[in-house]
Image (spheres, grey):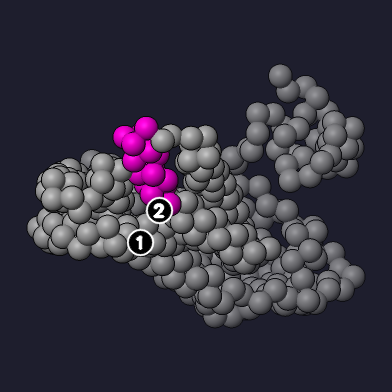
């Protein structure tokens, strides 16, 4: 379906470009007929038909391009979501890139078909205009080429500088995001250690670089804008002067002079759209980054089932990072165990390992004699419950949080609360 829609977009783009190229010819025929006093409804009808076709094809192409962009962006984000969910609570490689993928890369990559269609339209209209301009009079093409030769290098150079500044702005932003994420992860340690001011200075260290990069980018954008905007009027003026000499020499008619001006404007319209090449290149880079994240192998989910048992958890030589080293622990069924310790000494890591929420680097975690890594996810979720120290409820009420991700109504929520033994507590809450 996506391939057919993209093919339809290209077809509409070609039709719109063809109608755009025919419109100046139809307009010149009407102008010559008005000058000669021979205007009739057939020529007006032809002009209206060509103009209507151009408007209709352009509108349809715009709507279809928007639909394709939205569909591709949604598909990429769904695929990225499935990939990240496949990692469970383990952090996948390049988590910062994955977050950037959700916000920008998926949308940029999803716009590739629309950008390609826009680039095809610009190339067809510009090249077709030059051919038709040469058919009218080769001198017009010479005037066009000479005027454009001054503007295109300036616009391309400024656009290249803008792309370089754009990439330079992302580096300090990514560094700031990574520092902030690490600081938030260790928020309790920072608060208890009394180093909040030091951490704030460390996290905000890339901020001056971001400011400098942002200012330079806006200056580069200003430098990239004026050559492109100056190219169109200068080109039209040069072609108009050449066409005026052609009219006085009898080589061109008034209608052809009007068509020459239109073709000059259409031909020069490619200059401000040179940026489409850079945008298409950025979309391709974004697609490659998303594909790289999706290519990261997710941990294989287990398939084992729990045998009949009461829920004994055993740790055998478990190590996680630098906080847990060769830990051996057995928590028998029916036990109530409290793990006490200062922040950042491994209490949260140990709780995560016991709940099956944190993978171990070495050793194994057994639940009733079965390795947790080999258990099917449904079996593990049914056997273990986890309540964080700082829960973050989703929704505006307890009912929203309990029924999250399902179509359960209020009765089903009440039954779930009663089954969990918290029905009376929830009923007494405001």
Is residue 359 visible in the rendered image? The answer is yes
Q: Is 28 colored magenta in this rendering?
A: yes
Q: Which residue does the numbered mark 1 point to in the structure image?
A: 128
Cβ atoms at labels 2 and 1 below 8 Å apart: yes
Is residue 347 visible in the rendered image? The answer is no
Magenta stretch bounds: 21-37
Query: Picture coordinates of residue 364 (x, y %)?
Result: 63, 78
N-term mark: 2 or 1:
2
Give the residue displayed 88% in from the left and 37% down from the top: 412
- Magenta span: predominant SS is helix
Height in image: 207 above or below 15?
A: above
Give the residue displayed 66% in from the left and 61% down from the top: 355
Q: Which residue does the numbered mark 2 point to in the structure image?
A: 21
Query: Picture coordinates of residue 42 (x, y %)?
Result: 53, 40
- The reply, left or right, for residue 73 in relation to residue 148 is right
Say which element carries label 1: helix
Q: Nearer the viewer, residue 33 or 62?
A: 33
Query: Picture coordinates of residue 170 (x, y %)?
Result: 28, 56
In the picture as drawn, the residue positioned furthest to the top comes out as: 430
């Amino acid at each position: 379906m996506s391939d057919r829609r993209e093919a339809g977009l290209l077809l509409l783009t070609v039709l719109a470009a063809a109608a755009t190229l025919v419109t100046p010819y139809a307009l010149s025929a009407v102008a010559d007929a008005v000058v000669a006093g021979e205007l009739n409804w057939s020529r007006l009808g032809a002009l209206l038909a060509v103009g209507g076709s151009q408007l209709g094809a352009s509108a349809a192409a715009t709507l279809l391009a928007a639909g394709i962009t939205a569909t591709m962006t949604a598909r990429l984000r769904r695929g990225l979501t499935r990939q990240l969910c496949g990692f469970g609570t383990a952090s996948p490689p390049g988590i910062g890139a994955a977050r950037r993928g959700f916000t920008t890369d998926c949308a940029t990559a999803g716009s590739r078909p629309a950008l390609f269609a826009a680039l095809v339209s610009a190339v067809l209209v510009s090249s077709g205009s030059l051919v038709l301009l040469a058919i009218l009079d080769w001198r017009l093409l010479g005037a066009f080429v000479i005027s454009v030769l001054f503007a295109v290098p300036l616009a391309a150079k400024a656009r290249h500088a803008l792309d370089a500044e754009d990439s330079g702005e992302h580096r300090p932003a990514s560094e700031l995001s990574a520092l902030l994420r690490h600081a938030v992860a260790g928020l309790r340690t920072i608060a208890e250690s009394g180093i909040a001011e030091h951490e704030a200075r460390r996290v905000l260290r890339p901020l001056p670089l971001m400011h400098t990069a942002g200012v330079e980018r806006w200056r580069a954008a200003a430098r990239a804008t004026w050559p492109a905007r100056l190219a169109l009027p200068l080109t039209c003026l040069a072609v108009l002067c050449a066409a005026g000499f052609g009219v006085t020499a009898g080589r061109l008619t008034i209608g052809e002079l009007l068509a020459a001006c239109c073709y000059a404007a259409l031909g020069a319209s490619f200059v401000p759209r040179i940026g489409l090449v850079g945008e298409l290149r950025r979309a391709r880079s974004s697609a490659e980054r998303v594909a790289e994240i999706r290519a990261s192998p997710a941990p294989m989910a287990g398939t084992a089932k729990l045998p009949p048992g009461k829920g004994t958890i055993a740790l055998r030589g478990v190590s996680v990072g630098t906080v847990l080293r060769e830990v051996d622990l057995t928590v028998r069924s029916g036990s109530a165990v409290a793990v006490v310790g200062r922040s950042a000494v491994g209490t949260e890591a140990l709780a995560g390992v016991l709940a099956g929420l944190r993978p171990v680097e070495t050793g194994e975690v057994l639940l009733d004699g079965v390795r947790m890594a080999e258990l099917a996810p449904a079996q593990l979720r049914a056997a273990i419950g986890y309540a964080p120290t700082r829960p973050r409820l989703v929704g505006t009420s307890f009912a929203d949080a309990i029924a999250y991700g399902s179509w359960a109504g209020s009765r089903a929520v009440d039954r779930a609360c009663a089954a969990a033994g918290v029905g009376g507590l929830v009923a007494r809450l405001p």
